[in-house]
Amino acid sequence: MALVNVKDMMQAALEGHYAIGAFNTNNLEWTKAILETAEEQKSPVIIEVSEGATKYMGGYKVVADLVKDLFEAKKISVPVALHLDHGTYEGAKAALKAGFTSVMFDGSALPLEENIAKTKEIVTLAHFMGATVEAEVGAIGGEEDGVKGRGEVADPEQCKLIADLGIDMLAAGIGNIHGPYPANWLGLDFDCLAAIKAKCGDMPLVLHGGTGIPEDQVKKAISLGVCKVNVNTECQQYFAAATRKYIEEGKDLEKKGYDPRKLLKPGFEGIKEIVAIKMAMFGSVNKAN
């Protein structure tokens, strides 16, 4: 089996009323942890990477080769897609050229007309190459950008315009944000989500900022058409906490505890733990077939 695009897994999730976890990778440990957990949980999975992480890891081809080689070496049998998260126009084209099976073109900050034109071009190119496309309406906020409460809420009419461009999944802002949620966060706007669903029909919807959203809100969002939930911050938090514990207990000073294979293992296991938790929450466990 080779890496796949998200078309079939999104359709199955839509019909089965569950969601696929899209977990950001940052290095070898992240990629191995996501793949191993997906195989153990018999869950389809999306490994995604931001443009910043791509640069850190050495470029689009390095990321694509790493995921493909680990997928083959570990004999992964569940469906796995490689997705570019929040890609620019040039980034989406570069990812497709490198062998990514899915891309997000994030034109949400552009004037609507330019967003539409560039989305059309990326859709045409991606579909020609057998890949799938996610687009966004309503920029997702983030505490690091000074967001104090709810993130931006998308216009359902604009969602319909973008959905009709031939994209395969739509990310729409419904009050969600990236990073840790502030104490005064108002929660997801389910009225907006229902209106978007009514306008866009069977279009698979994407929930960004999956870290920190209460489980009942995540499950309600899935019941209203969300088929993909992005998780990044929580994996970083679990990795950092496990690594900190290892060092604070002085284990890096015992024998060859400083060996990176030992030093990074607790964090690796931490990522596996949270990925498994999220897969159970999203309902994708044992859905690989």
Image: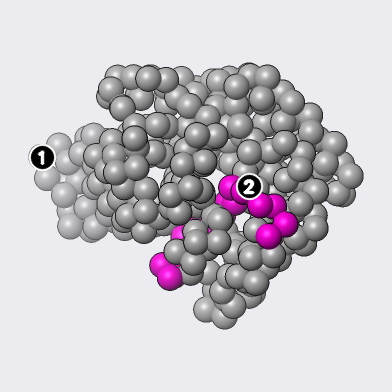
Q: Residue 3: x, y in percent?
A: 45, 24
Looking at the image, tell me whether mark 2 or mark 1 is earlier in sequence order. 2
Does the magenta run of residues contain 67? no
- Residue at the location (47% across, 38% down)? 9
- Tell me, yes or no, whether the two marked residues, 2 and 1, touch with CB atoms within 8 Å: no
What secondary structure is found at the residue carrying circle 2? loop
Question: What residue lies at 42% left-to-right and 20% top-to-bottom?
Answer: 2
Q: CA distance from mark 2 to mark 1?
A: 55 Å
Taking 26 as reference, is 74 above or below it?
above
Q: Is residue 39 left or right of residue 127?
A: left
The amino acid type of the residue labelled 2 equals Met
Task: Provide residue 275's location: percent of width, then percent of height.
Answer: 34, 49
Task: Name the residue nearer the viewer: 207 or 87.
Answer: 207
Q: Is residue 274 above or below residue 94?
A: below
Residue most extreme to the bottom: 184
How crowded pointer 1 is (Cα within 10 Å; few <14, some 14-19, many 20+) is rated as: few
Quadrant (top left/top right/bottom left/bottom right) for the N terminus: top left
Observer able to see residue 140? no
- Residue closest to the eye, 138 or 178: 138
| x 46%, y 42%: residue | 12
Question: Which numbered circle lies on residue 255?
Answer: 1
Residue located farthest toward the left when viewing the structure as drawn: 255
Residue range corresponding to the magenta coloring: 198-216
Q: Which residue is mark 2?
A: 203
Say if residue 103 shows up in the picture.
yes
**Magenta run includes residue 212:** yes
